[in-house]
């Protein structure tokens, strides 16, 4: 029995759809098939972080590992490499002690020892009522640098 061009196309499409279900279930994530539906962790709030130097200048969030790496999947899921441990974990609100500890660890790095202190601004974003999302709270903490080296 010979298949027509239309029958071949339908068969190929059916096999691709079946593979989207079978491959992740049998083998886990195997490019291009994945079981990771976007936003499956259903975050209800997140935080934006900004870091400021002694003169009030905005510092590069990536240098302090305070940038967002969230892509809609749980952090580290389906990316092929393990991302660095950043301060911002989408869907999670960090407390002051955790933020301070994270920043102090970054201040220990050679490139950051010239700052006598930095300030962390945490902006918590979440539901405001039932129909809006916005800033719930802003906190700002000054973190003294125990590794400060005056380079004058």
Image (cartoon, grey):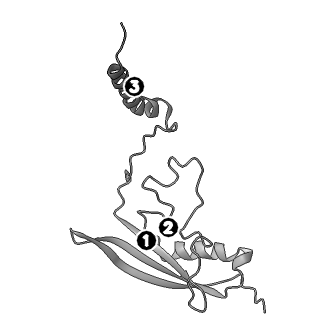
Tell whether label 1 touches label 2 (CB within 8 Å): yes
Q: Is residue 74 above or below residue 60?
A: above
Mark 3 or 2, nearer chain start:
3
Residue 34, picture quadrant: top left
Q: Earlier in the sequence, mark 1 or mark 3?
A: 3
Q: How many marks?
A: 3
Q: Nearer the viewer, mark 3 or mark 2?
A: 3
Residue placed under numbered mark 2 in the picture: 88
What is the x, y in percent for residue 13? 37, 28
- Residue 95's disc number: none
Query: Taking 140 as reference, is 130 left or right?
Result: left
Label 1 or label 3, whichever lies nearer to me, is 3
Crowd around label 2: few <14 · some 14–19 · many ≥20 (10 Å): many
Separation of residues labelled 1 and 3 (CA atoms): 44 Å
Outermost residue toward the top in this view: 1
Q: Earlier in the sequence, mark 2 or mark 1?
A: 1
Residues 20 and 15: in front is 15
Label at residue 12: 3
Name the residue at 44% across, 82% down. 139
- Categorize mark 3 by other alpha carbons within 10 Å: few (<14), some (14-19), many (20+): few
What's the distance in space between the residues labelled 3 and 2, CA to CA?
A: 42 Å
């Amino acid at each position: 029995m010979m298949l027509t061009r239309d029958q071949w196309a339908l068969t190929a499409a059916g096999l691709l759809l079946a593979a989207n279900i079978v491959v992740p279930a049998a083998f886990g994530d195997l490019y291009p098939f994945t079981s990771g539906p976007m936003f499956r962790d259903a975050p209800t709030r997140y935080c934006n972080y900004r870091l400021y130097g002694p003169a009030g200048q905005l510092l590069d969030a990536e240098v302090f590992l305070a940038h967002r790496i969230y892509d809609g999947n749980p952090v580290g899921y389906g990316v092929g490499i393990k991302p660095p441990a950043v301060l911002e974990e989408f869907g999670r609100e960090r407390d002051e002690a955790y933020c301070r500890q994270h920043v102090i660890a970054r201040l220990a790095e050679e490139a950051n020892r010239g700052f006598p202190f930095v300030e962390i601004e945490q902006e918590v974003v979440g539901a405001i009522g039932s129909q809006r999302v916005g800033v719930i709270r802003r906190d700002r903490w000054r973190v003294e640098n125990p590794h400060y080296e005056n380079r004058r």
